[in-house]
Structure formats: structure tokens, C-alpha cells
Amino acid sequence: MAIDKDTVRKVARLARIAEPEDRLEPLAKELSGILGWIEQLNEVDVEGVEAMASTVDVSLPLREDRLQEGDTGGGQPDNVVANAPKTEDHFFVVPRVVE
């Protein structure tokens, strides 16, 4: 399935995405390529392949969830922040990200 420049313009407008006119043609080619890959996947014979409900093997044994000394710092807050580059009153000090 090929996507043209007008379709990209319409989809961008519906999605409220502002795309400059010179980007519409490259996007049309890129989206057409993606749809081409999807069409290729549709051609794969999956007859007899059981659908997966999960990618995780649910039969794996799980350990008991219990609190261990390392989980809390052993009641010693200095141990928790020992490797931090900068601390203050047993808290990690990080650079400000919002001004």
C-alpha cells in the first residue's frame, strides 16, 4: 500500500501535528516502507504456531519475596548513600531539572 503526500497531510492534520510541506514527501515514502514491511509480515505462514499470551515463561520458579538487610540499608542510612557523589541529611542531591 503506497501512501501519498496528501494522505500524510490529512493524517498530520487529524493528529494535530504540524509538518512543513517539504517533509511530507519523505514521510510518505517512510510510511509506505513501513506498510510494505507489514504486508511482508502478513505473508508469513503461521499455521500451527500457537499464539503467545505472554513473552514470559510463567512456569519459572519464583523466590519468596522477603525483606533482606540490603533492601533497607540495614537501618544505617549512611550505608544507603555511601556511593552517592553528593548527599545531604541522608538524601541524594541531584541537579535541578525544572527551573
Image (cartoon, grey):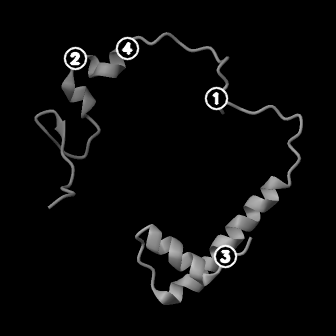
Query: Label 3 to label 2, Cα distance in Å?
Result: 62 Å
Specify the amino acid type for callout 1: Val
**Marked residue nearer the N-terminal end (3 or 4):** 3
Can you tell which quarter of the image residue 95 is in? Answer: bottom left
Can you tell which quarter of the image residue 58 is in? Answer: top right
Q: Which residue is depicted at the point 55% across and 83% down? A: 24
**Marked residue nearer the N-terminal end (1 or 3):** 3
Specify the amino acid type for callout 3: Ile
Q: Name the residue under label 4.
A: 68
* Camera-nearest label, 3 or 2: 3
Residue 41 falls left or right of residue 55: right
Query: Label 4 to label 2, Cα distance in Å?
Result: 11 Å
Q: Which residue is depicted at the point 41% across and 77% down? A: 18
Q: Which residue is depicted at the point 22% across and 17% down? A: 75
Checking the image for residue 56, the label placed there is 1
Specify the amino acid type for callout 2: Gly
Vertical position of residue 91 compared to residue 60: above or below: below
What element does badge 2 sit on? helix
What element does badge 3 sit on? loop
Q: Cβ–Cβ below 8 Å for labels 4 and 2?
A: no
Q: Name the residue under label 3.
A: 3
Instruction: Give whichever of 57, 47 is nearer the camera.
Output: 47
Instruction: Give whichever of 36, 56 is nearer the camera.
Output: 36
Residue 71 place in picture, x, y as percent: 34, 21
Specify the amino acid type for callout 4: Gln
Outermost residue, left direction?
89
Query: Label 2 to label 1, Cα distance in Å?
Result: 35 Å
Q: How crowded is the residue under tag 3: few (<14 C-alpha within 10 Å), some, or many (20+)?
A: some
Q: Cβ–Cβ below 8 Å for labels 1 and 3?
A: no
Q: Name the residue under label 2.
A: 75
Residue 83 falls left or right of residue 50: left
Q: Cβ–Cβ below 8 Å for labels 3 and 4?
A: no
